[in-house]
Amino acid sequence: MSQQPKWEDEKNRILSLSLEEKRKLYKSNDYIDVNQVDPWSIYAVKNKDIEAKKHTVEDLNEFKKFKIDPAKNKELSEKVSIFKGDITKLEVDAIVNAANSRLIAGGGVDGAIHRAAGPLLQAECNTLGGCPTGEARITGGYNLPCKYVIHTVGPQNGSAPNLQSCYEKSLGYQSQYKLRSIAFPCISTGIYGFPNRLAAHIALRTARKFLESNKELERIIFCTFMPIDVDIYETLMQMYFPIHEKNYD
C-alpha cells in the first residue's frame, strides 16, 4: 500500500496517463483543445472590427516602457490568444489561478478552478504553506483538462511590480515542467481592484518579453471573461503583437 498521501498518488497517476486516457476522466466533453483557440494572427483577421479600436496616449506611454523586437512580430502573433470563456475548460499544460495568500479556495476564478479540479487540489495546496503576493506555486490539475494549476497571488494595493512578478513567476515554471501552453486570467482586476487597462499592459508586456527569449512555450492564452477586458485586450494586442505594420508605426 502506498505511503504517499492520496493527492500525490492521484496527481502522479493522472500525469502518467496518455491524453486519450486522461480524456476518459473528464466530467464532460465540453473541454477546449488548445488548437481550437485561434492564435491572435487569425483572431485579428477574423474580427475585422478590432482595427477600429485605437490606443490612447496613455497606452502609448505605457507601451514605450518595453521595446519590442519587430523581427519577431509575425512569429509571436501566432503564439498568443484571446479566449472569451471559462478557463477551467481549457486543455492546456497549465492554467493560472488568481489565488489568495493562504491558497484556500475563494470566490471568482479561484473558486471555479477548485470546484472543477475536485478536493484533492485543496489537499495539495494545504501542503504548500501559502504563497506571498507576487509569488507563484504549482500543483496538479486533477479533474481539470489541464495538467497543472499555477497559483499566483496578485496585489491588493495596486502594486505594478507585484503584478508583473505574478506573470514572471508563473512563466518561470515553463522550463522545469516543460510547459508548452499556459492560460492566464486577468489577475487582480476583480475584487482586488487593480485597474484593468494597466493590468493588461503588464500582462502583455511580460508575455512579449518572455516569448522573445523562449522558444519552447508555444502558446499563451489570455482569458478575458468580462466585456471590458475583451475590449482592452483587443486594443492592446495590436500594439504588443502587431500583425500589420500600421499597428506599431
Image (spheres, helix red, strand yellow):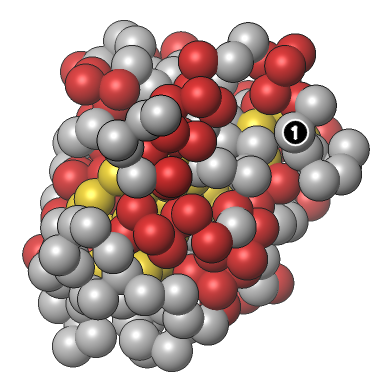
Residue 73 in view in this figure: no
Dot 1 crowding, Cα within 10 Å, few <14, some 14–19, many 20+: some
Q: Which residue is at a point 55% across and 27% down the rendered structure image?
A: 14
Q: Position of residue 72 (x, y in %)?
A: 35, 15
Q: Which one is nearer the viewer's eye here, 2 or 249?
A: 2
Quarter of the view holding residue 101: bottom left
Question: Is 88 located above or below residue 208 in the figure?
Answer: below
Residue 4 in view in this figure: yes
Question: Is 130 located above or below residue 135 in the figure?
Answer: below
Quarter of the view holding residue 21: top right
Q: Which residue is at a point 32% across and 59% down the rendered structure image?
A: 125
Residue type beneath disc 1: Leu
Q: Which one is nearer the viewer's eye here, 74 or 189?
A: 189
Disc 1 marks which residue?
25
Is label 1 in a helix, a strand or a loop? Answer: loop
Q: Which residue is at a point 31% across and 76% down the rendered structure image?
A: 100
Q: Position of residue 34 (x, y in %)?
A: 66, 27
Q: Which residue is at a point 75% across and 33% down the rendered structure image?
A: 25
